[in-house]
Every structure is written in C-alpha cells, then in structure tokens.
C-alpha cells in the first residue's frame, strides 16, 4: 500500500511538472502574445521578469516531471502557483484581463477554469510535498533533466533582447504621448487636420493579435468622438495578399511599411490624436469600439 501511494504521488508530481513544461514552451512559441498580455498589467518590472519566469517554469517542470527533489520542488510549486493566481486575480478584477496567458496563444481558458485549474494544481503540490518520502538521487534522470533544462535556457535566452524593443508606453511617458503628430513619422505620410480627432492603428499583416483586432479597429468610425481612421501596416507582400484575401477594408487609408520600430515598438498599437496631439496610446489586442470608448475615450 505504501508503495502504491508513493507511485501515485510521483505521478502527481510528473503531471504538475508536465503542466509547467507545457506552459513555458507555449509562451516561447508565441512570446509576443505573452508579452502583449503582460503589458496590459501596466507594471514595468513584469516585462523584464518574463525570461526568469519561463526559466523557473522549465526548471521546476523538468525536475518535477522526473521526480527529482520532489519535496522541495512541490513546496516551490505551491508558492509559485499561488503567486500566479493572485497576479491573475488582480489583472482580472482591476485590469479586465481575461486571458491568463499561462499557455501563450496555444490554449486559452475562461477565468473560472483558470482559478479551478490552479487550485487543483496547488492541492496536488501540497499533497506531493506532505506525502512523498525523500529518495536517493537517480543520476540518469538528473542528467536528462539538466540537458532539457539547458535547451530551455538557451531558447529562453533569445528573449532577453525583446524587452528593449518593447518599451512600455504609459500615460506618463513623454516620448510620444502629447507629442505633435505632425512632428512624428506619421506626419510625414498623412496631412493631419487640427480640427479632427483621429484613430491611428499600427499593425502587422502576419501578427495574430493584429488580425484579431482588425474587425474591432474598423468599427471605430462608428464612434462620434473619432472623425477619421488611418492604418499603418507592416509585412511582406505575401502576408499582405493573404491579409486582403480575408479582410475587406474600405474608406480607410493604409500606409504600408512606413513606420520604424522607433515609433511603433510592438504590434498592434493604437494612437488617439486630438488637436494634432497624441493624447492616448493603447498597446495590445484592440477591444471593441464600445468597450474602448467606455474605458478610454473619456475626453470631451
């Protein structure tokens, strides 16, 4: 009976480990999706913590999957999962963030499912911590785990360059906010009228988050506060052809490959311009025009 219990808790440890591994590599598969999601929390340090979080998930996942240092790692799992759950609860309650980003863009879940899943994993981790007996190290498992961990750190290391290219534009950041639009790259390609209010949408033809935002972006002309829309796009000719085979954009001027990364650091990014001044910047998947108007367009 004792042997069966030990096997059961080792299986639970492997299940928890597999979840962490899947979570880490799902984020790496579409790191921009997870980065855009983290940006929505509007806490600067989070963006730089992403690589360390992914490495921690890989390390914890591999060790738990191979039943190495089970008691220690189960305890770490309890604290890590509790921390992630609290952060997501904050984002859901305060920032209206529904996607937890746990598995990148590979698998998205409803909020209630996220909370239930995390509670189950926390309970499993507590059981593994309390019931598993300390065993001798398995050198073969340890070697395999180190190899997998090494590959994980290598792939994650490529991400360290990204935060520098994805600086967060917050309301208090003066780089573009409140800047005269005519003195930016946008003003080089479009003649803005000081008497009109504009919505400028910068996107990539191949970005899945941009594609998910397009239909919402097109509806902004239904808002009384927005007089005109302008799109700035980026991408290859092949991506452009695929885009226009699936989306019909009429009466909205589109300027292709005109904006540098110094102006638009990530896609999609939405700019609101009034009196020739950039008064609001929104990064990430664009919500519906109704939600955007209610939450952000509170100017007269």
Image (cartoon, rainbow, N blue to C red):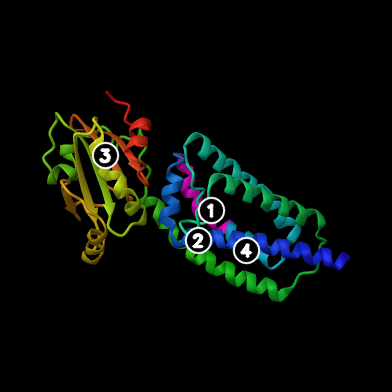
Instruction: Point out residue 5 in the picture as x, y percentages from the top left corner.
Output: 83, 63
The residue mark sitting in front, 3 or 2, is 3
Residue matched to label 1: 102
Residue at 72% x, 50% y is: 123
Residue matched to label 4: 18
The tag earlier along the polypeptide, 2 or 4, is: 4
Report if residue 250 lies within the magenta region.
no
The Cα atoms of the two marked residues, 4 and 1, are separated by: 13 Å
- Nearer to me, 228 or 275: 228
The tag earlier along the polypeptide, 3 or 2, is: 2
The tag earlier along the polypeptide, 3 or 4, is: 4
- Mark sitting on residue 26: 2
Q: Quick check: marks 4 and 1 in contact, CB under 8 Å?
A: no
Residue at 68% x, 51% y is: 120
Residue matched to label 3: 220
Determine the main secondary structure of the stretch shown in magenta.
helix
Q: Quick check: marks 1 and 2 in contact, CB under 8 Å?
A: yes
**Numbered range of the magenta stretch:** 43-56
The tag earlier along the polypeptide, 4 or 1, is: 4
* Helix, strand or loop at mark 3: helix
């Amino acid at each position: 009976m004792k042997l069966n219990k030990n096997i059961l808790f080792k299986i639970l440890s492997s299940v928890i480990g597999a979840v962490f591994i899947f979570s880490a590599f799902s984020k790496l598969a579409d790191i921009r999706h997870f980065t855009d999601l983290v940006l929505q929390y509007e806490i600067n340090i989070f963006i730089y913590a992403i690589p360390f979080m992914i490495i921690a998930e890989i390390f914890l996942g591999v060790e738990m999957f191979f039943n190495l240092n089970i008691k220690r790692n189960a305890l770490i799992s309890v604290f890590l999962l509790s921390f992630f759950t609290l952060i997501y609860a904050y984002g859901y309650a305060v920032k209206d963030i529904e996607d937890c980003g746990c598995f990148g863009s590979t698998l998205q879940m409803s909020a209630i499912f996220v909370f239930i899943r995390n509670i189950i994993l926390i309970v499993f981790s507590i059981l593994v911590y309390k019931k598993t007996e300390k065993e001798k190290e398995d050198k073969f498992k340890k070697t395999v785990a180190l190899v997998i961990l090494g590959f994980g750190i290598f792939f994650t290391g490529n991400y360290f360059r990204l935060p520098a290219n994805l600086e967060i534009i917050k309301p208090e950041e003066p780089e573009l906010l409140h800047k005269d639009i005519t003195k930016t790259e946008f003003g080089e390609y479009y003649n803005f009228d000081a008497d009109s209010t504009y919505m400028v949408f910068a996107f990539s033809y191949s970005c899945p988050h941009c594609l998910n935002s397009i239909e919402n972006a097109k509806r902004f002309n239904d808002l009384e506060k927005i007089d005109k829309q302008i799109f700035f796009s980026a991408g290859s000719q092949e991506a452009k052809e695929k885009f226009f085979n699936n989306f019909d954009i009429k009466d909205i001027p589109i300027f292709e490959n005109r904006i540098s990364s110094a102006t638009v650091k990530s896609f999609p990014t939405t700019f609101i311009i009034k009196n020739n001044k950039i008064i609001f910047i929104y990064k990430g998947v664009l919500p519906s025009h109704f939600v955007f108007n209610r939450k952000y367009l509170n100017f007269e």
